[in-house]
Structures are given as structure tokens and as C-alpha cells.
Image (tube, rainbow, N blue to C red):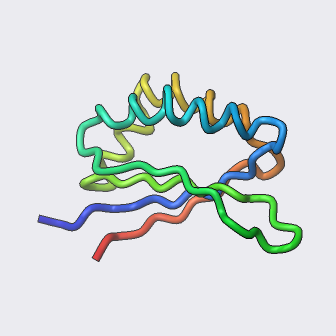
């Protein structure tokens, strides 16, 4: 069996909406994603000391058993319903992601 995948998504958060981001993650996003087929884990990280001029101070870590199951989640009605609650708190470039295979 293949090892799970992990997606690292850097989020450019509007400072005025930081509390809303954390609330939406805890109360909406995490409960919904955790029920998806192949879900392994999700975490919202905040950088302790951002570099000067850094705007992306949060990182979303999403793990699924396979990339195909993660893609199924992204295409789901649940994702289309809960992602906007996260995205509305972002600004500028909003987000960028890197996909990793867990070794």
C-alpha cells in the first residue's frame, strides 16, 4: 500500500480576518474534511516569527491516503461549500500549494 500524501498550502491571510479564519477552520472545514473518504489529517499552522515582508503566515496541512482521494474531496459538494469560508479570509495571492508523498 502506498504511503499517504500531504498537501502544504500557504495562506495569505487578511490580518483583520485572522480570527474568522481560525473559527471557520475549527468549526466548519475540519469537521467536514475529516469525514471524507481517505482522510488522514488536517492542521492549520501559524508561523511563529515570519520573515520581514512575509505575507503568508498560515499553512494548511492536508493528508489523504492517496492523491486521487484528495482530488475527489476537492471536487465534492462538501469542499465547494466549506472552502469559500476559508478563502474569504485570504488576500493578495491568497494561497499556494505543494504536494508531498509521505515517505
The reply, left or right, for residue 14 in relation to residue 103 is right
Residue 89 image offset from top left, x and y in percent: 73, 36
Is 44 situated above or below 52?
above
Q: Seen from this angle, which residue lies furthest left?
A: 1
Residue at 29%, 45% in the rendered image: 39
In the rendered image, the quadrant that contains the N terminus is: bottom left
Residue 61 image offset from top left, x and y in percent: 47, 56
Residue at 33%, 37% in the rendered image: 34
Residue 54 image offset from top left, x and y in percent: 81, 66
Residue 76 image offset from top left, x and y in percent: 40, 29
The reply, left or right, for residue 17 in relation to residue 1 is right
Pick whichever, 59 or 78, lies toward us.
59
Residue at 72%, 31% in the rendered image: 88
Q: Seen from this angle, which residue lies furthest front?
A: 48
The reply, left or right, for residue 63 in relation to residue 98 is left
The reply, left or right, for residue 15 in relation to residue 73 is right
In this figure, what is the number of numbered marks? 0
Is 51 situated above or below 45?
below
Pick whichever, 23 or 78, lies toward us.
23
Q: Seen from this angle, which residue lies furthest bottom?
A: 103
Residue at 75%, 47% in the rendered image: 13
Pick whichever, 48 or 13, lies toward us.
48
Q: Quadrant of residue 17?
A: top right
In the rendered image, the quadrant that contains the C terminus is: bottom left
Amino acid at each position: 500500500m502506498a504511503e499517504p500524501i500531504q498537501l502544504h498550502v500557504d495562506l495569505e491571510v487578511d490580518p483583520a480576518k485572522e480570527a474568522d479564519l481560525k473559527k471557520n477552520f475549527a468549526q466548519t472545514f475540519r469537521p467536514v474534511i475529516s469525514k471524507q473518504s481517505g482522510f488522514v489529517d488536517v492542521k492549520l499552522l501559524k508561523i511563529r516569527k515570519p520573515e520581514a515582508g512575509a505575507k503568508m503566515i498560515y499553512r494548511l496541512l492536508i493528508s489523504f491516503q492517496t492523491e486521487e482521494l484528495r482530488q475527489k474531496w476537492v471536487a465534492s459538494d462538501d469542499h465547494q461549500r466549506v472552502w469559500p469560508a476559508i478563502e474569504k479570509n485570504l488576500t493578495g495571492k491568497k494561497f499556494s500549494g505543494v504536494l508531498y508523498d509521505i515517505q
